[in-house]
Image: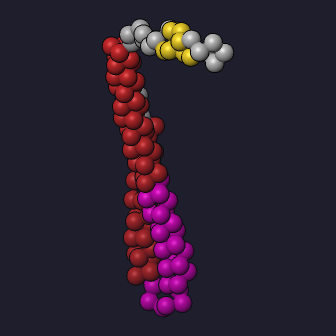
Amino acid sequence: MRLDRNQTSIGVGALLGIGGFVTIAATWSAVAARLEVPLQMPYLVSGSFAGLGLIAVGVTVVNVQVSRRLNARRRQQLDELLDAARAELAERAARETKPLRRRKTNVVSKASGQITAHG
């Protein structure tokens, strides 16, 4: 069974987000083990920024892939609508194609003043 690339990317984005939360939890654990604030700061800064970065990247990947999927579905629906409209126009054109009759017109000659019929 072949997985859809879009689904795989959404899964990767979700894993990145979960990894960010795990990183923040590990950072909290490391910070909680230290009693002195100066020793807590390196863990707090590096771990929280890395965790927030992973969450942001994960959310962005999921957002982009969901948007691509929705746009593809919308494009497919628009193509189906255009095909239906083309078929309807072709059907109407086939029904309405009748040979046109030319109307007879009267032309007055300036030189002789005679009326002649054309058409």
Report whether residue 15 is seen: no
Task: Looking at the picture, tell me which residue is in the foreground, 82 or 64.
Answer: 82
In the rendered image, residue 11, in percent from the top left (x then y), is placed at 40, 47
In the rendered image, residue 87, in percent from the top left (x then y), is placed at 36, 20
Q: Which residue is located at x 50 percent, y 15 percent?
A: 106
Look at the image and tell me in which quarter the N terminus lies: top left
Q: Which residue is located at x 49 percent, y 91 percent?
A: 37
Q: Please tell me whether residue 36 belongs to the stretch shown in magenta.
A: yes
In the rendered image, residue 18, in percent from the top left (x then y), is placed at 39, 59
Against 15, residue 39 (above or below) is below
In the rendered image, residue 61, in percent from the top left (x then y), is placed at 47, 53
Task: Looking at the picture, tell me which residue is in the foreground, 1 or 102.
Answer: 102
Residue found farthest to the front: 112
Report whether residue 115 is seen: yes
In the picture provided, is 88 more to the left or to the right than 45?
A: left
The secondary structure that dominates the magenta segment is helix
Task: Looking at the picture, tell me which residue is in the foreground, 21 or 119.
Answer: 119
Task: Looking at the picture, tell me which residue is in the foreground, 58 or 90.
Answer: 90
In the picture provided, is 35 more to the left or to the right than 81?
A: right
User: Where is residue 79, by image quadrant?
Assistant: top left
Against 76, residue 71 (above or below) is below
Against 68, residue 61 (above or below) is below
Point out the stretch of residues depicted in magenta: 33-61
Q: Which residue is located at x 34 percent, y 19 percent?
A: 92
Q: Please tell me whether residue 78 belongs to the stretch shown in magenta.
A: no
Q: Which residue is located at x 46 percent, y 37 percent?
A: 5
